[in-house]
């Protein structure tokens, strides 16, 4: 189950909660009752190396001229 981060627009209370992807987003702060917003962090994907296209999908070059 994914973990989502929320922050209150009114009191700045921040917290994480595990929710199913089909669950509705939370809208009310548990501390003050204010409006919540989802907080999005960095994506955990890192591309390293010489590149997918060059190593895997490039057309073969012919050395015959």
Image (spheres, grey):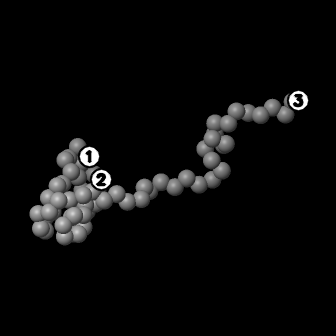
Q: Callout 1: helix, strand or loop?
A: loop
Work out which quarter of the rendered image holds the C terminus and state it. Answer: top right
Residue under label 3: 65
Q: Position of residue 10 (x, y in %)?
A: 18, 67
Q: Is residue 29 left or right of residue 52?
A: left
Label annotation for residue 11: none
Q: Kindly identify the residue that appears in the image at 17 percent across and 55 percent down.
A: 27
Q: Position of residue 51 (x, y in %)?
A: 63, 47
Q: Callout 3: helix, strand or loop?
A: loop
Q: Name above or below for residue 22 compared with residue 13.
A: above
Residue under label 1: 21
**How far is mark 3 from mark 2, CA to CA?**
55 Å
**Mark earlier in primary sequence (3, 2):** 2
**How far is mark 3 from mark 1, CA to CA?**
56 Å
**Mark earlier in primary sequence (3, 1):** 1
**How far is mark 2 from mark 1, CA to CA?**
7 Å
Q: Of 13 and 56, which appears nearest the observer?
A: 13
Residue under label 2: 2
Q: Of 26 and 56, which appears nearest the observer?
A: 26
Label 2 Cα crowd, 10 Å radius (few <14 / some 14-19 / many 20+): few
Label 1 Cα crowd, 10 Å radius (few <14 / some 14-19 / many 20+): few
Q: Quadrant of residue 55?
A: top right
Q: Is residue 21 left or right of residue 65?
A: left
């Amino acid at each position: 189950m994914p973990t989502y981060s929320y922050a209150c627009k009114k009191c700045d209370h921040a917290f994480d909660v595990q929710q199913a992807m089909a669950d509705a987003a939370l809208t009310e702060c548990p501390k003050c009752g204010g409006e919540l917003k989802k907080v999005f962090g960095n994506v955990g994907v890192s591309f390293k190396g010489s590149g997918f296209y060059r190593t895997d999908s490039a057309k073969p070059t012919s050395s015959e001229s």
